[in-house]
Amino acid sequence: MGYDVLTTGYVSMDRILKIQSPAQVGFTSIISNKDNSKINYGGCSINISAALCELGKNALPIIRVGTDYEEIGFKDFLVNHHVSLNGLTKIDHEYTSCSYLVEDKEGNHITLFYPGAMDKKYYGELNDNLFAGTRLAVITVGPYDDNLAFFEKCKKYRIPLVFSMKLDFDAFPRDLLWDLLCYSTIIFTNETERKAIEEIFKMDITGFFKQGNADIIVTTCGKDGSAWYRKEGETVTQGIVPAYQCKKIIDTTGSGDAYLSGFIYGYLENKKVSECAALGATLASFVLESEGCCTNLPDCSKLMTRYEKYSHSL
């Protein structure tokens, strides 16, 4: 029996540093948040897997961690979110990858990243047993060798692929990017990523309905919601789903991964594309209302209660 979803991508132990004045060489910036040493567990593959596991899906991240992963609470985090450790490899004499997010008073971020155990030099062969029988795979930003190997396993086992680019051309150089876009069943981008793809390949992103295997393409548009496109035979249908109106947005970090997770949940439940997009918007709203990518993930009951109220307003 395979997994509902396999994910790959960087792990990140995030620490958020909020500063009141711009960071400049030669000047001291005062950190305003007293919880600046608190670890927010995440990384795209973790955000997606944790969200789906909270909703009752069997999602497995294929990741590497350092020998510190128990000490820093990451193992407990995974267990508490019902995430299996079967895809985890521990690297001796190394630390788990981490990020420092420097946030100014306008909410803009500078991200500093230490790859640690996720560094490409620690790449190892992937276990075929993890792929056999799996329903869906999600590839996000990660080391090139890991991405390529994950992609090859998906092709070997004919697993439908969900692609989320994150605008990283080290992880996805042009040729691999083209191959992934052509193979993927579902393509997710934000507006900036979509524009970059269209400029690189000199075509509208919906051209991948003809060039490749895409059935669904989604572009998230921040506060303006999301636009979706669905291939149905020789025609393409499309729609726009507005963003869920949060009472107060606390932190936008991880909201894109939350949207993708909600969408995939709907897809696995055989929902219509418009319903999948609405579920994505609903799940994203929970993450927007709290600091950290995984601190406010809902279970299925909470998600569907909010979704029902939201969907009636559409």
Image (cartoon, rainbow, N blue to C red):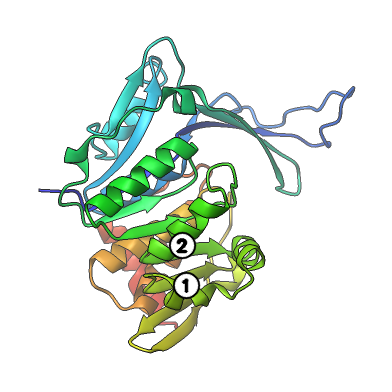
Earlier along the polypeptide chain: callout 2 or callout 1?
2
- Relative side of 4 to 117, left or right: left
Q: Position of residue 128 (x, y in %)?
A: 20, 39
Residue plotted at (24% across, 40% down): 82
Q: Is residue 110 visible?
A: yes
| Callout 2 crowding tier (Cα within 10 Å): few <14, some 14–19, many ≥20 | many
Q: Nearer the viewer, residue 101 or 230?
A: 230
Tag shown at residue 208: 1
Residue plotted at (38% across, 49% down): 48
| Callout 1 crowding tier (Cα within 10 Å): few <14, some 14–19, many ≥20 | many
Amino acid under label 2?
Leu
Residue plotted at (45% across, 28% down): 118
Residue 22 in which image quadrant: top right
Tag shown at residue 181: 2
Mark 1 element type? helix
Do tag 2 and tag 1 residues touch (Cβ < 8 Å)? yes
Mark 2 element type? helix
Residue 265 in which image quadrant: bottom left
State whether residue 205 is above or below residue 293.
below
Amino acid under label 1?
Phe
